[in-house]
Amino acid sequence: AEDSTVRVWKLKSMQLSHTLNHGAGVTSLLFADGSLFSGCKDSVVRRWDVGTGDLLATMDGHENKGWILCLLAKRSELFSGCKDGTICQWDLKRNALIRIMGDPEDQHESGVTCFMLYGETL
């Protein structure tokens, strides 16, 4: 949300389970294997334990607002797109940046607002 939080609700009881606090407005969410990943306007991707609400990792690699997240589950990799025109590839076993995709001249001139994985193609 723009108030820098993600609220996790139990659907059956409609009760608030956790409030996850960020440094700025949240722009994207992705759920996988018990973890919630959030992209934020402070350029940090965060990994949360959905059951406990604990922050598991922060992944910093963008220079500007993060906008989109996509998961490649079979390789335990996450991709994040950003307003700075970059796409970062993350290793979820180590919660670490693998690389920023492409050479600077190959990157977008403005923000990456959407992308999709299809097999081994992004």
Image (cartoon, rainbow, N blue to C red):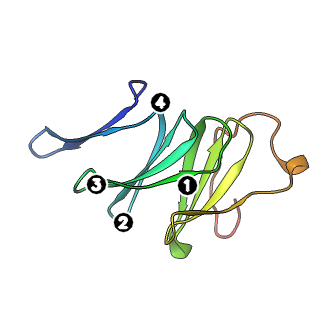
Residue where numbered disc 2 is placed: 33
Q: Quadrant of residue 35?
A: bottom left
Tell me the amino acid under the disc marked 1.
Cys
* Residue shown at the point (82%, 47%) measured from the top left: 107
Q: Quadrant of residue 111?
A: top right
Residue 68 screen position, x and y as percent: 57, 44
Residue 34 screen position, x and y as percent: 32, 62
User: For the residues marked 1 and 4, what is the alpha-carbon distance in whole angstroms?
Assistant: 20 Å
Label 2: how many Cα within 10 Å (few below 14, some 14–19, many 20+): few
Dot 2: element: loop
Tell me the amino acid under the disc marked 3.
Val
Tell me the amino acid under the disc marked 4.
Ala
* Residue shown at the point (53%, 60%) measured from the top left: 71
Residue where numbered disc 1 is placed: 70
Tell me the amino acid under the disc marked 2.
Asp
Dot 3: element: loop
